[in-house]
Amino acid sequence: MIRLLVWILLGYVVYLMFKGRAGKKDLPKETPVGEETHRDPVCGVYVAKDDAVVGRLEGERLYFCSMACLEKYREQIENKS
Ligand SMILES: [Zn+2]
């Protein structure tokens, strides 16, 4: 009986995964005008939210163009304190 429940649960998880994938496919590929962009605090480049490297530093959400910039920013914070 327990084994049956496990299989049902497994099936449900697989179903959710397929559903999620199908939902993503339906999204338009072209990004709408006014796409959310964030300024990289290190190099000053504007990066699209989807392409950005997101860093959570000191409780703040920051967006970077690359991991290198994230690391630089982290170093700057560490040097300050
Ligand atoms: Zn950068």
Image (tube, helix red, strand yellow):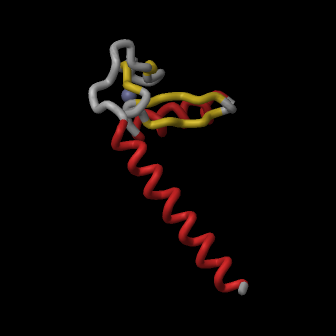
Residue 9 vertical position relative to residue 59 in the rendered view, above or below: below
Left/right of residue 78 with respect to residue 19 in the rendered view:
right
Residue 65 vertical position relative to residue 14 in the rendered view, above or below: above
Q: Residue furthest top?
A: 34
Picture residue at 37% right of the left edge, 24% below the top: 47
| Image x and y of residue 56, in percent | 60, 36
The answer to which image quadrant residue 24 occupies is top left
The answer to which image quadrant residue 58 occupies is top right
Residue 52 vertical position relative to residue 3 in the rendered view, above or below: above
The answer to which image quadrant residue 9 occupies is bottom right
| Image x and y of residue 17, in percent | 48, 58
Residue 57 vertical position relative to residue 16 in the rendered view, above or below: above
Q: Residue furthest left?
A: 30
Q: Residue furthest right?
A: 2
| Image x and y of residue 32, in percent | 34, 19
Picture residue at 55% right of the left edge, 30% below the top: 76
The N terminus - image quarter: bottom right
Give the total of numbered labels: 0
Picture residue at 45% right of the left edge, 20% below the top: 38
Instruction: Please state the quadrant of the image where ligand 1 appears.
Output: top left
Picture residue at 43% right of the left edge, 28% below the top: 49
The C terminus - image quarter: top right
